[in-house]
Image: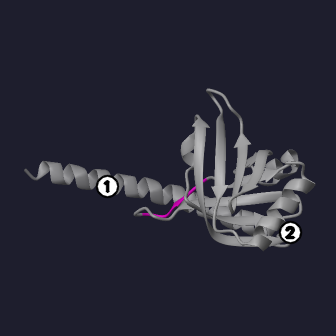
Amino acid sequence: MIEPIIGFSAFILIVYIIIRSANKSRKEQYKKLIESLKAETELFVEQTKSSTMTIGLNNRDFLFNRCDLYLTKNAMIILGFTKDSFLKQLSLPIILTTELNEFSNRFPFAYVKKANKISFENNIVKINFGEKGITKTEVILKLNSLNEKEKNKIEQLAEKNCW
């Protein structure tokens, strides 16, 4: 009778330890990235509501419902996290830019890609990035709750970088 309780408790403890250790390394990555880009940051948006949809493999790194945005003159940095769960789960840092080599060398731990498409409709910014395919991941990110200033800044960045 007590074995199922012990087994379930052990399972919960293992999941907790795995999530906590993953978050610890991601938190360090986030700190390094933020500190390196602090002087270049033109706009910071904290905890904007977002939703993601992924197609392909390796998609668990891109599933989040909130994100912090950092805009520089040539990149959009997305630090996503899931806020509604038992533990705050941090996602893979995402950098959208046309200067892939520069950012890949500076931040080898981040997912650095060029945005495939960006659209602004019904107060939602929709960004497609990644690659389609069986062994690749394409991500569709929707950013909600942005004000006009933030949307305009994202639109300027997109136009400047030909997204």
Question: Of the residues shown, which amino acid type is indicated by label 2?
Answer: Glu
Cβ atoms at labels 1 and 2 below 8 Å apart:
no
Q: Which quadrant of the structure image shows residue 81?
A: bottom right
Q: Which quadrant of the structure image shows residue 76?
A: bottom right
Label 1 secondary element? helix
Task: Between label 1 and label 2, give the one nearer the viewer.
Answer: 2
x%, y% of residue 150? Answer: 77, 69
The kind of secondary structure the magenta stretch mainly shows is loop
Residue under circle 2? 40
State the residue at coordinates (49%, 64%). 88
How far, Cα to Cα, is label 1 from label 2?
41 Å
Residue under circle 1? 12
x%, y% of residue 66? Answer: 58, 63
Magenta stretch, residue numbers: 87-91
State the residue at coordinates (7%, 50%). 1
Q: Residue furthest right?
A: 160
Residue 150 lies left or right of residue 16; in this view the side is right
Determine whether 103 is above or below 147 in the image.
Answer: above
State the residue at coordinates (58%, 38%). 58
Q: Residue furthest top?
A: 134
Q: Between residue 6 and residue 41, name the one nearer to us.
A: 41
Determine whether 29 is above or below 109 in the image.
Answer: below
Label 2 secondary element? loop
